[in-house]
Image (tube, helix red, strand yellow):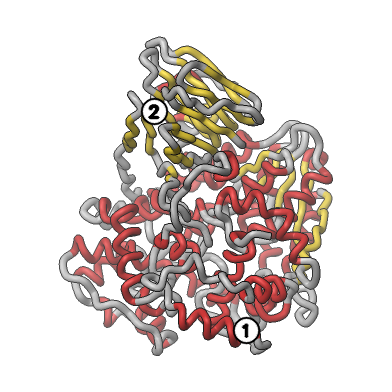
């Protein structure tokens, strides 16, 4: 989905020369390669849709016939539609407004260059000679210290380059720019004993899959976990197996560890056999030729500022899917389910136990509980230090720095958001000062900027019964737009495929925004992803016993094993990273006000001299290395 909107009343108006012109008048030119709809609103405005409109919502149904699409002329009605798109509205007096789909899956960047506004889908669509400004150190700190390795939703790596946030509208009138935002109304949890909601969830999820499916071919990116296999099971519930195929990656990150996801491969094959669908195995081989893979993704990753290894996997999976795809195929993936159901704690990974997968699942529930309403109440009442779950996690973090609890319930509510989204620690009160990459002053500036941009406006609106709704709303500005999720849609698009994420359905997200703590998010006995697993047991054909045993990777039986260790210390990325570090100007982007340059130089020297790095140093080498091999000239 590539587009560029050029707006200028200057005599020196930019004349498009390269891209297909979608719309043009004396003030505005729209170019691009994306599907579009054009219509006239009742007030005489011209409206243009760029991108993929899936359909409109009517209660719990999604109608893909595109009826009522003209309602998209009203910015306040975007929540009534599913898809990944941009709306451009041009009034009769040449007031121009731009907004995106409800979850902001489409990107809107903009820059003002010599009295000309360029509004684009990515940096690639901005004229190369445009002045984007110096490096935004807050954006760079976000890339290097927050999981996802991409600037947050409204940030970029350049001070003069802007991005539109969630539920925001960009307006240019008389060459003056303004941004408006619709008010977020949080949802309140439903009663924990209202088990009729389990059927509601089942209906919502099945409908989310149905509405996104193709009559021609449905390709599932299969991992063997609950999320992707639930999509496979639902597709087989709705369609014949000859319309469904699966793709899985065989991970070979280094010669020393060989295949690191054999558990996942074996279980995925069992699921494919059970449902009588073909499973295509794609090699994710980083033992050699990392430079060739990097060169393939370079244009896309630079354009959208993606700097995470997961994006490379998504690229290769999308390429593999394209080789088996038919015209009209769609690609399904289970991403964001972990966050939406259990705040990301759904990997059997919070506390390792060698003999019990069930205990490891319960430890995920314990970790989720610490960010839930019950523990928030403990924090506000000052009783948290005596909480048994808190004590258990503290025993695993004896050398970790924790922030002092703030005073007042409003400030504590903000602190829990900052811990969750900004600290990088995945435990309440985890201090950003554990981070060695940033200076003390850099950490303070980073926290102030990110908190004021994304979090502080919600601190006096959070209640115990709407906390989860706030988390899921904010996820769209953080992890779900980052380099481990958004890369799916972009890489599929690069190969001419549409990516479908049924867990990002508004009906499903609304339900999970209201799901109570006892439904798999707290210390009650219900499993993680409780309504999803209930559906698999009670509503569709699913071999529940297949989910026993090790989850996916070698770390399921060996807690010392690390994907990052294999990439940093033993893969072909190692040479790429070293080459990037050995350039004389590799630190030019880093301000000494924000970044501890002595620390960076020390760990880089150690790494380049052949010494393996571990712990935080290893993570920092990975993050800096991934940033440099994309951002540096090739």
- Residue 455 at x, y percent in the picture: 31, 55
**Name of the residue lying farthest toward the front:** 12
Residue name at image x 60 percent, y 53 percent? 302
Residue name at image x 43 percent, y 70 percent? 424
- Residue 543 at x, y percent in the picture: 70, 57
Q: CA distance from mark 1 to mark 2?
A: 51 Å
Q: Reply above or below: 527 against 56.
A: below
- Residue 179 at x, y percent in the picture: 33, 36
Q: Nearer the viewer, residue 272 or 134?
A: 134
Q: How busy is the neighbourhood of tag 2: few (under 14 within 10 Å), some, or many (20 plus)?
A: many
Which disc number belongs to residue 75?
2
Q: How many marks?
A: 2
Q: Reply above or below: 189 against 421.
A: above
Residue name at image x 79 percent, y 38 percent? 243
Figure quadrant of the C terminus? bottom right
Q: Nearer the viewer, residue 135 or 323?
A: 135
Q: Earlier in the sequence, mark 1 or mark 2?
A: 2
Q: Nearer the viewer, residue 9 or 89?
A: 9
> Tag 1's secondary structure?
helix
Which disc number belongs to residue 238?
none
Closer mark to the observer between disc 1 and disc 2: 1
Which disc number belongs to residue 607?
1
Residue name at image x 79 percent, y 46 percent? 245
Figure quadrant of the N terminus? top right
**In which image quadrant can residue 18 be found?**
top right
Q: How busy is the neighbourhood of tag 1: few (under 14 within 10 Å), some, or many (20 plus)?
A: many
Left or right: residue 605 versus residue 76 is right
The reply to whether residue 285 is visible in this rendering is: yes
Left or right: residue 192 versus residue 485 is left
């Amino acid at each position: 989905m590539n587009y560029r909107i050029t707006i200028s009343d200057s005599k020196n108006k930019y004349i498009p020369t390269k891209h297909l012109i979608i719309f043009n008048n004396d003030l505005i030119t729209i170019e691009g390669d994306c599907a579009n709809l054009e219509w006239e609103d009742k007030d005489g405005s011209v409206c243009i849709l760029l991108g993929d409109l899936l359909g409109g919502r009517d209660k719990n149904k999604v109608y893909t016939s595109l009826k009522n699409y003209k309602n998209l002329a009203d910015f306040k009605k975007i929540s009534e539609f599913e898809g990944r798109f941009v709306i451009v509205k041009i009034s009769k007096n040449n007031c121009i407004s731009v907004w995106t789909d409800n979850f902001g899956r489409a990107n809107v960047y903009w820059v003002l260059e010599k009295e000309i506004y360029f509004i684009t889908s990515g940096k690639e669509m901005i004229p190369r000679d445009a002045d984007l400004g110096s490096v935004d150190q807050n954006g760079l700190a976000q890339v290097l210290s927050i999981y996802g390795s991409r600037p947050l939703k409204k940030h970029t790596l350049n001070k003069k380059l802007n991005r539109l946030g969630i539920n925001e509208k960009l307006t240019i009138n008389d060459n003056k720019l303004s941004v408006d935002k619709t008010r977020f109304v949080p949802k309140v949890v439903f009663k924990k004993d209202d088990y009729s909601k389990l059927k509601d969830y089942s209906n919502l999820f099945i409908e989310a899959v149905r509405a996104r499916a193709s009559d021609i071919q449905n390709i599932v990116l299969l991992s063997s976990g609950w999320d992707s296999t639930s999509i496979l099971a639902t597709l087989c519930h709705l369609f014949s197996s000859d319309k469904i195929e699966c793709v899985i990656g065989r991970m070979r990150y280094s010669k020393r560890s060989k295949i690191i996801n054999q558990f996942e491969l074996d279980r995925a094959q069992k699921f494919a056999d059970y449902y009588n669908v073909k499973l295509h195995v794609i090699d994710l081989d980083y033992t050699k030729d990392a430079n060739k893979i990097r060169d393939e993704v370079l244009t896309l990753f630079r354009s959208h500022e993606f700097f995470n290894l997961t994006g490379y996997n998504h690229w290769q999976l999308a390429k593999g899917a394209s080789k088996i795809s038919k015209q009209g195929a769609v690609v399904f993936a289970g991403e964001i389910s972990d966050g939406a159901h259990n705040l990301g704690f759904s990997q059997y990974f919070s506390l390792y136990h060698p003999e019990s997968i069930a205990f490891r699942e319960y430890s995920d529930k314990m970790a989720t509980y610490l960010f839930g309403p019950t523990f928030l109440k403990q924090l506000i009442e000052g009783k948290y230090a005596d909480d048994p779950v808190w004590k258990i996690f503290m025993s695993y973090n004896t050398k970790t720095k924790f922030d002092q609890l703030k005073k007042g319930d409003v400030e504590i509510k903000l602190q829990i958001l900052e811990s969750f989204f900004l600290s990088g620690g995945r435990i309440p009160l985890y201090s950003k000062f554990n981070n060695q990459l940033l200076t003390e002053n850099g950490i303070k500036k980073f926290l102030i900027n990110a908190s004021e941009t994304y979090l502080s406006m919600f601190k006096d609106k959070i209640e115990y019964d709407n906390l989860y709704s706030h988390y899921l709303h904010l996820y769209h500005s953080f992890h779900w737009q980052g380099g481990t999720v958004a890369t799916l849609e972009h890489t599929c698009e690069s190969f001419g495929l549409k990516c479908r994420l049924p867990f990002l359905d508004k009906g499903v997200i609304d339900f999970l925004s209201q799901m109570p703590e006892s439904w798999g998010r707290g210390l009650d006995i219900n499993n993680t992803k409780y309504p999803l697993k209930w559906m698999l047991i009670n509503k569709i054909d699913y071999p529940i016993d297949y989910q026993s045993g090790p989850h996916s990777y070698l770390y399921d039986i060996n807690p010392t094993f690390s994907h990052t260790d294999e990439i940093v210390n033993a893969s072909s990325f190692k040479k790429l990273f070293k080459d990037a570090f050995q350039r004389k100007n590799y630190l030019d982007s880093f301000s000494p006000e924000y970044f501890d340059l002595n620390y960076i130089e020390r760990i880089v020297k150690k790494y380049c001299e052949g010494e393996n790095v571990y712990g935080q140093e290893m993570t920092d080498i990975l993050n800096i290395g991934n940033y440099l091999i994309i951002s540096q000239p090739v």
